[in-house]
Amino acid sequence: MRSKEPKKKTDGQRNISFAPILRHSVLFCLLVMVVIFLGGGVLTVSRVRSDAEAALTASHARVAQRVDGAVDLLESLASLPEFYDPQVPPIDKVRKLDRMSPYFGYLMICYVDSDILVYSDGEEPASLASRDYMQRLFSTGQRQVTDSFAAGADGTTLNYTVAVPLVDGEGTITGCLFCAIYFDEVVDILGQSAQTSGAEVTLIGTRGQIMSSTAGLPYGDSITDVLRTSALFGTTADRLEERLLAARPGTYWSLRNGSLYYTAYQRVEHTGWDVLCSINFATAYAGTLPSLLLVAGLTILLCVGHLWLVRRSIAAQMKVVDVLVHSVEELENRVYRDERPEGADFQEVLRLTSNGLTDSLTGAVTRSVFLNQAEALLKKADPRMTQALCFVDMDNLKHLNDSCGHAGGDIALKSIGYILREYEKKYGGVVGRYGGDEFVMLLTTLDDEQELRGVLDELVLRLQTNVQSGGQSIPVQCSVGVAVCRPDAELERMIADADEALYYVKQNGKGYYHIHQN
């Protein structure tokens, strides 16, 4: 028969495709990117709220400080007799107030008598009786803070007015003092607050009209009309108007001109004004984008580095696989060839078979290796010779383990393996450990069944031995079932027949052999 050439395996067949790992890694990286940018959105929501609150606090404090400062100044002046005493000439009061106005940064500080006539240096007194806030001041005796309105000789100068009554010792209102706060000054206050936090700040008057806005909202328009052009979340324009009129602070989200805004609002004390501070979500998110891109870039670098390490690890493992595959190919080439070459390195063969291919205790090959080698030996066996498969089973391993421990059982198994391997070499066969105390042995160069029986007679005697332990000698014996190879016989069938013959021995006294009869 011609020798069977071992199959050659190309490197490509042993390569592990890196594409699935790359796809999953890219998908994982994309998911991490989504999480990073969604996390940025969550952080931006928190930042938008804090920035809006900060802008509201800053703008509210500055406006309130300016109004309170004006009230405190006027009330301190109103407590002086030289201002509330009607016997002091009005011109003297006006001259003192005119000297104070530039120092305190007011457009003007004016005196009004009990007839609601306002005096100025070098000009005839003018009546302010038509002013609503003057009517309220003289009728209620309470200080007044007005919305912005047009005043002055040209009738176009916008300002805010703070007025306090002049009351004599008997509680009679003898007039009032008022000052005008520059409109542009309030605009600057709102602008500084907006610039610091990036907010849009709007000042609303007592009637809900827009008095000043860094967002470019038209002066004098109703804030309710503006809100109705936006999509509000969790509230309506009418509900917001009610809250503003009730001087109740709050917040809301809105969608205006395609942009998402967060707004916080609050009433300015001692006035009828409300301050609204809005933060654009997109603008705030753009501010966090550089940090998010940095984190995303670092994440991509980490993913790429991880992929590189994984690829290196796989390459290193594939080198080990290549060595193992080469060793198996070499083993197949040496074990399954028809003729053993001159000067074969049997130590190398033993080295190749020692790592997982042979039983370390008995020296017999493992079950899977036995099946492969036995198939190969049967295929190339000389049909003029007799082939037999022996199923060897130790009769009293359990008793031996109980009496001498597992060390005694191991000694017996090692001895049986050594004996069987002698016959393997002598009769061109192979021995394998089939189970715990079971061995299978194929002999292929027997002359006939008569020689087979002679070999079996000798074998069962040699398999009867003694194990010394603890000063006692424990006998060991084996039973053997045998199947003779018939034309076209299959290995599995021979093993089954040998197992059946072994069962026959076990049922009829043990310690001997029986040849299966077809």
Image: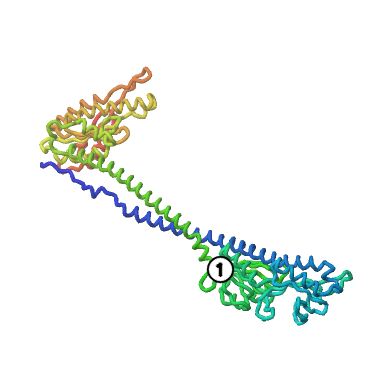
Position of residue 268 in the picture relative to residue 369 (left or right): right
Viewer-nearest residue: 185 or 111? 111
Residue 68, image x, y percentages: 72, 66
The x, y position of residue 398, in whole percent, is 36, 29
| Snapshot quadrant of residue 347 | top left
Q: Measuring 18% from the left and 37% from the top, which residue is drawn there?
A: 334
Q: Which residue is mark 1?
A: 261
Q: Amino acid at mark 1?
A: Tyr
Q: Say what secondary structure mark 1 lies in.
A: strand
Pick the residue in front: 244 or 518. Answer: 244
Residue 504 visible from this viewpoint: no
Left/right of residue 27 with respect to residue 516 in the rendered view: right
Residue nearer the viewer, 461 or 188: 188
Residue that protrudes farthest toward the top in the picture: 471
Q: Position of residue 305 (x, y in %)?
A: 37, 49
- Can you tell which quarter of the image residue 510 is in? top left
Residue 518 in the image: x percent, y percent?
19, 40
